[in-house]
Structures are given as C-alpha cells and as structure tokens.
Image (cartoon, helix red, strand yellow):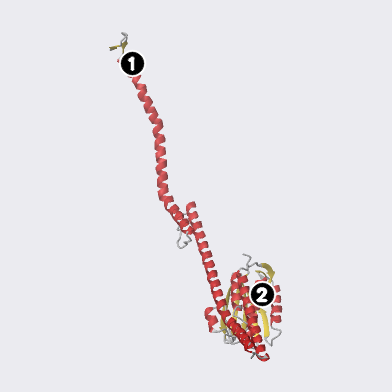
C-alpha cells in the first residue's frame, strides 16, 4: 500500500483500474481507424493497379495520337486491346484518323490535279499566243515599211481571229472543269421510263445533223421500266451527251446506247463502230487533254469530254470505263442509284 501526502491510503488495485480505460480507449480508436485506413489503402492500390493495367497504355496512345494529328501526321494507327468503353473510344479514334487521312489524300489529289491542269493550261496556250504575236508583228512591220497589202492584212486578221476563238473556247473548257470540281451530287427519285425517254430524245437531237444511225435500248426492259431510281439527272445527262457527242465524231454508220440496272448501279453504255480509242487513252484513262485526233492541231476539241465524264461519274459514286471491242469503241459510265 501507498500513503499520499494527506495520509490517505492508495490501493494498488485502484491504480490498475484507473490505467485500464486509457488502454482500451486507444484500442477502440485503432479499431475504428485501421479498417478505414486498410480500405482506403486497398482502394488506392486497386486504382493504381487498374490504371497501370487498363488505362495507362490506351490513354498514352490516345494522347500521342492526338499530338500527331495536331502535327498533321496521320501515318499511325490506334489498336484497341479491350472491348469495354475505352476500347470503343480507341476504335472511334481510329475511325476518325482514317477519315482524316482519306480526306487529306483526296485534298492532295485534287490539289495535284489542279496543278497539273494549270500547267497543261499554260503549256497549251503558249502556241496560240506565239501565233498571235507573230501575226501582230507582221502587221506592224508591214504598216511601218508600207509593204502591207490588203490580202496580207486579211490573212493575218483571219489568223488572229481564228486563234483568238480557239483561246476563248479553251478558256471556257478550263472554266467548266473548275466549276465541275466544286459540283455536288443531288440525286432525286425519278422513274426509269422517264430517264429512257429523255435520253432517247437527247440522242436523236445530238445526231440529227449527221447520217449516223442511233439505237437506244434497255436490258430487261419490261422489269426495269417499272422501277424508280435516285439520280442527279443533269449530271447523268451531261455524261451521256458527252459520250454520244464523242461517239458521233468517230462513228462510221451507227451508235448503240444501252441502259442496264444492276442492283444499285445504273450502267450507261455507248458503243460506236469507229476505229476505237487510241492506245494512249486506254493506257492513261480519261485524262484531260488526251484526244483521239492528236494529229489535228486545229481541232476545236481539247480532249476534255471524257475527263468531264469521269469526274461526274465519280461524283455520282460511280466510274467510267473505256475499252475497244471488235465493233469499235465502248464507253461504260456507272452511277450509284440508291438514296444514300
């Protein structure tokens, strides 16, 4: 036993009883705090593991891809490693990259095509301009020394008039190409029978001043004439009229025009019995300034008709195919005829 300063006896049991509640209090606090700490630490650890295993690599690829796109670098790919929402995000990002890449390639193609057209435009104008300058010099020299006769003056003026007309026609052809590149396809629902009737009328008008016999037919006529198609009619008829006009220039006696509906594609075929397409056109395709009468420098045609046809077919989600057969030249223009 112990006696305090006031003479009171302190029992050892009382001292132990006063110390026990403090220990229990500390254990109680730990009992409440440790589960929270363990759960928090487990959540943090699980989040870290989940981030490193599931999120870190895809997010890093997406961030790197976004940075490369900002630098106009599309030569990469994003691979999805899961089928969850993050994997779907990666797939959507990859589709966006492919669409941007396709658009950039199309813009690059159009820009290169425009450069090539401008270069060809400048090159083909050089000769007519040289002739005009030479004619002007002859007139100026003749006037200066008094040797210019009326006949010589008329010849020079006629040549100037002729080449000025050629330049005017050429510039108009080039301007039409520039406008066609900006043209948008706007298909409308139209009956196939109407297309056939108007095409036949247009073909007869285009050949009325020639002795060429023209025939317009439809494959599977009874079934096809009952259908409706989605067409940009001005665009399709522009192609048809260019192909018919080109065929009239080279046909000997006849031209055959046929229409065929193959699922969602309208096939317009124009066949003539002429000498066929030159090998340069078959080899290079419907490129601008390629002509079937290359030996004739005074021809009013500049080799733009087939190029216009190809351009319009592509705008209608189709194509233009040129080939030679036993009967002559055959051009097939394809147009998508569905609504979308």
| Residue at (54, 72) in percent of width and height | 115
Rendered location of residue 38, percent (x, y):
39, 37
Quadrant (top left/top right/bottom left/bottom right) for the N terminus: top left
Q: Can the viewer see residue 219? A: no
Name the secondary structure under disc 1. Answer: helix
Disc assigned to residue 237: 2
Number of residues whose C-alpha sits closer than 10 Å to that of mark 2, classed few (under 14), some (14–19) or many (20 or more): some
Discs 1/2, front: 2
| Residue at (55, 81) in percent of width and height | 281
Name the secondary structure under disc 2. Answer: helix
Residue 113, quarter of the rendered image? bottom right
Q: Can the viewer see residue 63? A: yes
Image position of 233 (left or right of 123): right
Rendered location of residue 189, percent (x, y):
68, 67
| Residue at (62, 76) in percent of width and height | 171
Disc assigned to residue 14: 1
Spatial separation of the CA atoms under disc 1 and disc 2: 114 Å
Badges 1 and 2: C-beta atoms under 8 Å apart?
no
Image position of 6 (left or right of 60): left
Give the mark, 1 or 2, whose residue is nearer the N terminus.
1
Residue 305, quarter of the rendered image? bottom right
- In the rendered image, the vertical position of residue 196 relative to residue 184, given as above or below: below
Along the viewing direction, whichever of 314 and 109 lies nearer the viewer: 109
| Residue at (66, 74) in percent of width and height | 237
- In the rendered image, the vertical position of residue 285 relative to residue 107, given as above or below: below
């Amino acid at each position: 036993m112990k006696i305090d300063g006031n003479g009171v006896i302190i029992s050892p049991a009382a001292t132990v009883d006063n110390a026990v509640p403090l220990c229990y209090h500390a254990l109680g606090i730990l009992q409440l705090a440790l589960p929270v700490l363990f759960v928090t630490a487990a959540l943090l650890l699980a989040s870290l593991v989940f981030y490193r295993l599931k999120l870190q690599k895809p997010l890093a690829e997406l961030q790197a891809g976004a940075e490369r796109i900002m630098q106009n670098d599309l030569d990469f790919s994003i691979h999805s490693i899961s089928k969850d929402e993050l994997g779907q995000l990666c797939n959507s990002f990859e589709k966006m990259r492919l669409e941007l890449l396709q658009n950039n390639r199309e813009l690059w193609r159009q820009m290169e095509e425009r450069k090539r057209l401008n270069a060809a435009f400048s090159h083909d104008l050089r000769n007519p301009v040289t002739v005009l300058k030479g004619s002007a010099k002859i007139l100026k020299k003749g006037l200066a020394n008094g040797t210019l006769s009326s006949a010589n003056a008329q010849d020079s003026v006629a040549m100037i008039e002729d080449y000025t007309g050629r330049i005017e026609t050429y510039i108009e052809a080039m301007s039409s190409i520039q406008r066609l590149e900006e043209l948008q396809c706007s298909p409308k629902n139209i009956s196939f029978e109407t297309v056939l009737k108007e095409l036949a009328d247009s073909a007869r008008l285009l050949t009325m001043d020639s002795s060429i016999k023209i025939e317009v037919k439809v494959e599977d006529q009874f079934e096809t004439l009952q259908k409706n198609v989605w067409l940009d009619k001005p665009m399709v008829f522009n192609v048809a009229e260019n192909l018919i006009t080109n065929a009239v220039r080279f046909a000997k006696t006849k031209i055959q025009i046929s229409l065929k509906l193959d699922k969602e594609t309208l096939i317009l075929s124009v066949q003539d019995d002429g000498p066929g397409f030159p090998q340069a056109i078959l080899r290079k395709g419907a490129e601008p300034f390629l002509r079937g009468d290359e030996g004739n420098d005074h021809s009013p045609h500049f080799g733009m008709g087939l190029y216009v046809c190809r351009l319009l077919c592509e705008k209608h989600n189709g194509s233009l195919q040129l080939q030679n057969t036993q009967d002559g030249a055959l051009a097939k223009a394809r147009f998508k005829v569905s609504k979308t």
